[in-house]
Amino acid sequence: MTEGLDPAATDPWEPVVAPLTVAVAAALTAHGAAIDPATVRLQLDRTGSERGDLALALHRAAKLAGKEPAAFAATIAAALGPVPGLLSVSATGAFLNFVADPERLARATLGTVFAEGEHWGHSRALATPVCVEHTSANPTGPFHVGRVRNGIIGDTLARVLRATGAPVTTQYYVDDIGRQAAMVTWIWSKPRAEWPEEARAAVAGATPEEEAAMRPDLRYGRPYSAVSRYLKSHPEAAEEVAAISRHLEERVDVPRHTEIARAVLSGMVASLGRLGITFDEFVWESTFLFNGSVEDVVARLRKAPHAVQEANGAWALDTTGYGLPKETARVIVTRADGTSLYAVRDIAYHEEKFRRFPRVIDVLGQDHHLHAKTLDAMLAELGASRRPEFVIYQDITVPEGGRMSTRQGKVVFVDDLLDEAVDRARAEVLKRHDDLSGEEVDAIARVVGAAAVRYHIVRVALDKNVQFRWEDALSFEGRSGPFLLYAYARASSLLRKAGADRPTAFDPARLATPAERALVRTIARFPEVVAGVARTTHVHALAGYAHEVAEEFNRFYESTPVLASGAERESRLALVAAARRTLGNAMALLGLEPLERM
RNA sequence: GGGCGCGUAGCCUAGUCUGGAUAGGGCACCGGGUUCCUAACCCGGCGGUCGGGGGUUCAAAUCCCCCCGCGCCCGCCA
């Protein structure tokens, strides 16, 4: 679809910005401030205001030229002849303000939107294949909201990278041999009568039939916290779990282990599916143990320049030279008994990734930050030529303090949140419609509920803790997922009523009201936003942009008649179609399903 | 104790990388708007020592230093 198109040409602002930066750089250079166009572009303020669409501060350039700033700005403004795409240039104090030609921008913007359709906003800037690993929670029970932030960030990032031309493979790394998975197997392979009292209590109340009907992650996950607590005070039981772990590592058959792990994972994945999160591949940690690659990594690490053997026979790596804090510089490679640790197995996994992908991105919670640095140091020690890029996000915290924790009972499960969101959405739908079937109502409620939850989590910057509060997570107003869906549905309704699904004929001169022009300017920024998110991994910026588009569309909608308008009707319908397309494409990148009506 | 991240109105949040002109939104609260295209909306109002102090600069929410608060990490767990 976009074949043959110059990637830069798909950004409607580009035909304005490119000649402008060249012209300004030339004027500055001619007046004693030698600055190249690239620097001008970087310093150009594109936020837009009532003063203009673009602005440039000239204080530094004035200093360079040895002139008084305001006078210098006036000189430059006067020196700039007509610039293609610009309506006016003015100097205010030491600032230069530029107003883009709105008709030209409207023509370029709507034209590009219609030409590119579902690829509008996308580019082919990043051609390098990339593996995005995210979520990777242990198969021990249902997802809580804290865990799912990883999946929402990872899935959104994968969608954005695909939209910028990268072939993306998403992976979920399943730890099927560690202590956590062993705990689940340990309890479920015991007769119920031999379970610790607290574990029995955790599963009480369900008949065998009810239990069999439960989704596997819910079913097998119930005794997990009780078992975890029990093991802390019962070393003999902890030893049994450790034995299971060892057997797994030694490939001794552990009855039911794989069956349970797979079942639990299938339930967890179903839960993520409700949020639109899917994976291309599941990678089982055990494969690296069984195919000999862990053994190989261990052998190479023991011969590495900074390898040291402890008195008890354990092997470690001194990573002091890699910038890790002194206290954590000694990384254990193998235990005294010779068995491997998670960090070492993760190296085998990453070496495998790099054999297949030139670029590797890992989405990790902040609790794994040190692990990420350690992994990087160990890969360096092994002479790896490529390193993973880490996308680190902060935790979701709860009002009573600290992050969510299943074991401490400070937890909200994804399914419970989604169920509540869908229930509330259903009530909202029923308030407004009596013409829909039960299935239609349910279908809308499912989409709206999922959008509310997913948007609530992506909207916050990665490096910020998200405070979880039910009422905020379930908001259908203001800066929310349903707000986006609502604007989309309104636009869809207009086009439906006009009987024009794909209006493409428009006259830019007819889009002259402030609301129309503001909407065009916002739509035009979409490609830049997508490219920026791909570059920075700041997926929350996309959530913010989508809200802006919906907001501008709503303002336009409230202030401007479309169907009942006269000569402007066709052009306004085209603008509605462009807004709907932009919103739809942005929502697709955010993993939100559009609704034609709600 | 050491390390990483964060601190913006009653609450949540954008902007910090790349310093610029009155710090954008949302929730809550107050006041308006529907014989008209979906009021899950729009318009107006209220509300800000950008955690505190110092520094750099013509200019600091943004850069540097110190301090305070919060989250997390510092396992031969994962």
Image (cartoon, rainbow, N blue to C red):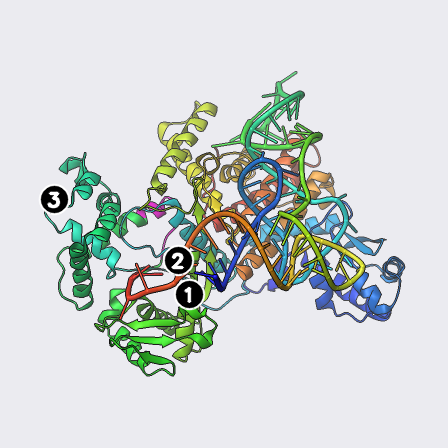
Horizontal side of residue B58 vs B35, given as left or right: right
Locate residue A294 relative to residue A116 in the image: left or right: left
- Residue type beneath disc 1: Ala
Q: Are marks 2 and 1 in contact (CB under 8 Å)?
A: no
How far is mark 1 from mark 3, CA to CA? Answer: 40 Å
Q: Position of residue A312 (x, y in %)?
A: 24, 75
Q: Nearer the viewer, residue A393 or A278?
A: A393
Magenta range is: A270-279
Residue identifier under label 2:
A134
Of pointers 2 and 1, the one earlier in the residue sequence: 2
Mark 3 — residue?
A192
Q: Amino acid at mark 3?
A: Arg
Residue A303's x, y, as percent? 32, 83
Helix, strand or loop for the magenta stretch, by majority:
loop
Residue A453 is tagged as: none
Residue A507 in view of the camera: no
Q: Please report whichever mark, 1 or 3, sits nearer to the chain's N-terminal start.
A: 3
Of residues A120 and B53, the one nearer the viewer is B53
**Which chain is mark 3 on?**
A
